[in-house]
Image (tube, rainbow, N blue to C red):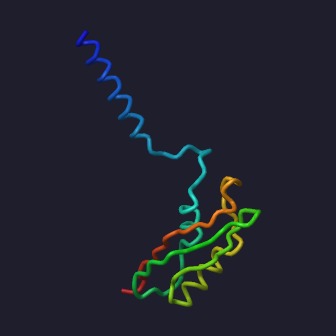
Amino acid sequence: MKTIKTILLATILVFSSHVSANTERPKNEPISVEEQIKALLKNSDLAIYNDVAIKLKFKLNESNEIIVLTNNSNDDDISEFIKKRLYLKELSIDKNNASEFYYIPVKFISTIK
């Protein structure tokens, strides 16, 4: 009886470690809102002298397009960049969540050394 429990436990451990090792996202799984925002803000040509962390608040309209409400940046160039990159860009999201407000932390890394 003890041997059967040991074999069963070993089988469960092997299975669970195999499952947790599979980290690729299935092709049909949606990308998170945060990842989509990150992709839209990627590859900036802004000159950033110091790292800047901001909080971005937005909502989506009925077409899942981004409406930026606020960001707490004191830098006009960063605020303008965010507006240009995100304004009315469509996100892939469940329609049931479209009326929510979203708060996303965004960090701009210094490009000037």
Q: Residue at x 56, y 43 (%)?
A: 26
Q: Residue furthest left?
A: 2
Q: In the picture, which quadrant includes the N terminus?
A: top left
The picture places residue 49, in percent across and down from the top left corner, at 41, 88
Q: Residue at x 56, y 88 (%)?
A: 77
Q: Nearer the viewer, residue 101 or 109?
A: 101
Would you place residue 62 above or below residue 77 in this image?
A: above
Q: Residue furthest top?
A: 1
Would you place residue 12 above or below residue 66 in this image?
A: above
The picture places residue 66, in percent across and down from the top left corner, at 68, 69
Q: Residue furthest right?
A: 62
Would you place residue 24 above or below residue 100 in this image?
A: above
Q: Nearer the viewer, residue 46 or 72?
A: 72
The picture places residue 10, in percent across and down from the top left corner, at 29, 23
Q: Residue at x 61, y 85 (%)?
A: 80
The picture places residue 98, in percent across and down from the top left corner, at 69, 60
- Residue 86 picture quarter: bottom right
- Residue 7 picture quarter: top left
Q: Residue furthest front?
A: 100
Q: Nearer the viewer, residue 5 or 83?
A: 5
Q: In the picture, which quadrant includes the C terminus?
A: bottom left
Q: Residue at x 71, y 54 (%)?
A: 95
Q: Is residue 66 left or right of residue 32?
A: right
